[in-house]
Image: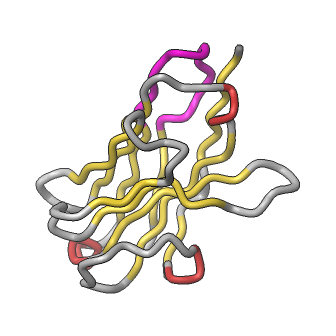
Amino acid sequence: VQLQASGGGLVQAGGSLRLSCAASERTASSYIMGWFRQVPGKEREFVAAITWGGSRTRYADSVKDRFTISRDKDKITVYLQMNSLKPEDTAVYYCAAEADVGIVPSVFDRSYDYWGQGTQVTVSS
């Protein structure tokens, strides 16, 4: 499965961006999908994840109430709506897929089997 992330860019603090992640195969419709982010010199950190049916989501505390993860009805496209962006949200954002139909999305990057190429998000103060 290949994942293609897009939607990053430069935005002022308080602004919004929407990231998209499209999977190349329909088998991904049954996978847990997630977003992680990484800044240079730091470990990759969990941002948000969603189960295959969209019934269960999970967020990092740092983005809760500001970011929303969702899946399109075809379930192979996942979105991350980011509102009230802060300079500390600046990072490369990666989408990932876990080949698991589990009901609890994992926050650990080692649980995910497929990764997109990353998209840069820069929030200016």
Residue 116 spot, x, y in % from top left: 53, 62
Magenta segment range? 7-18
Residue at 69 percent across and 62 percent down: it is 44
Q: Is residue 114 magenta?
A: no
Residue 39 spot, x, y in % from top left: 76, 48
Nearer to the camera, 23 or 59: 59
Q: Is residue 9 magenta?
A: yes
Pick the quarter of the image with the C terminus.
top right
Question: Does 34 sit above or below residue 83?
Answer: below
Pick the quarter of the image with the N terminus.
bottom left
Residue at 62 percent across and 52 percent down: it is 37
Question: Does 25 sit above or below residue 90?
Answer: below
Q: Is 92 displayed left or right of 106 in the figure?
A: right
Residue 26 spot, x, y in % from top left: 23, 72
Residue at 88 percent across and 55 percent down: it is 41
Nearer to the camera, 119 or 101: 101
The quadrant in which residue 30 appears is bottom left
Instruction: Specify the farthest residue to the left.
Output: 73
